[in-house]
Amino acid sequence: MNEMFQFFKQISGKLNLNIYAGIQGQSTPQQMAFIRNLQKEMRQKNTLDSPLNDLKVVVFDIETTGFYPEKGDYVLSIGAIKMKGPKIETGETFYSLIKSEQSLSAEIAALTNLSEEELQKAPPAAEVLMQFFKFVDGAILVAHHANHEQTFMKKITWDILRTKFNQRIIDTSFLIRLSDPYLKSMPLEEVCCICGIQIKDRHNALGDAAMTAQVWRYYLEIAQKKGFSNLTEVYEYLAKLE
């Protein structure tokens, strides 16, 4: 549980020059300054105490070639959508493919509906990451099965920008446990079925982010009905159940 509320620790690892195209350059001084300022502002915010109606989060999803970045799997695309409380800001979205010259397996191509040609024409990883961080602007990140997003974002941020990924991230299971403290992790489509959410554009980063945002809204409203004022109160309640 505590992992949901900790900043990511510094990661280590060797840079794999073959994973991301456009990786040749190091971070520019401007990029590093932006990231440092972003991290400083984030540390000064106490967003967990924000009223649930005013809580700003960015719900995001990534599509990858597999589950193990340390074994060569990499990020294909990032999709995100902003929320304020239970309101989904449909006009505030982010989506981008990430440039790659690697061959795409038939299985992943079919699952994500992406092609090697699209990935070859996509923006380089450094550009996509900086655009994504500017879009997030220090907000709490929310993801379904967040450990997947966490692992890959730590890896790509270090490999490309040579800096830590210090964004706060919360798994949807955090709020879902308010309905069933012992509920095990489920695929996104199963949770959507429980919540009555239409399954649309599955395994598209923005499509999955949009569905995850609806899941977050569903359980955020449950938290409000149960009388919780902020995420800190939810955390303290769930911690007692451990």
Image (cartoon, rainbow, N blue to C red):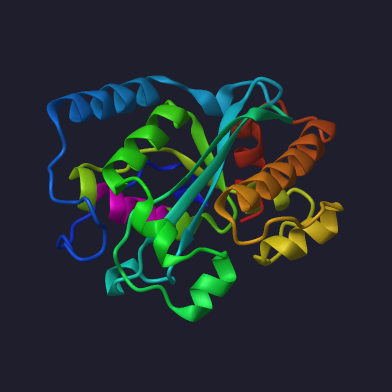
* Whether residue 137 is visible: yes
- The image shows residue 104, relative to residue 171, as above or below, that is below
Q: Residue at x 69, y 27 (%)?
A: 85
Q: Quadrant of residue 185?
A: bottom right
In the image, is residue 231 above or below residue 109? above
Evaluate whether residue 182 shows in this view: no
The stretch in magenta equals 150-158
Q: Is residue 42 left or right of residue 9?
A: right
* Residue 142 placement (x, y as % from top left): 56, 43
* Residue 207 position within the rendered picture, expressed as x and y whole percent measured from the top left: 64, 50
Where is 84 relative to 180, above or below? above
Q: What is the x, y in percent for residue 133?
A: 38, 33
Image spot of residue 121 (x, y percent): 36, 52
Magenta-colored stretch includes residue 156? yes
**What is the total number of numbered labels drawn onto the structure image?**
0
Does the magenta segment cover residue 104? no
Quadrant of the image occupied by residue 87: top right
Q: Residue furthest bottom?
A: 106
In the picture provided, is 133 more to the left or to the right than 199?
left
Left or right side of 182 for 76: left
Residue at 59% from the left image edge and 56% from the top image edge:
204
Q: Nearer the viewer, residue 113 or 205?
A: 113
210 displayed left or right of 225 = left
Q: Residue at x 18, y 61 (%)?
A: 13
Q: Which quadrant is home to the C terminus?
A: bottom right
Q: Main secondary structure of the magenta part?
A: helix
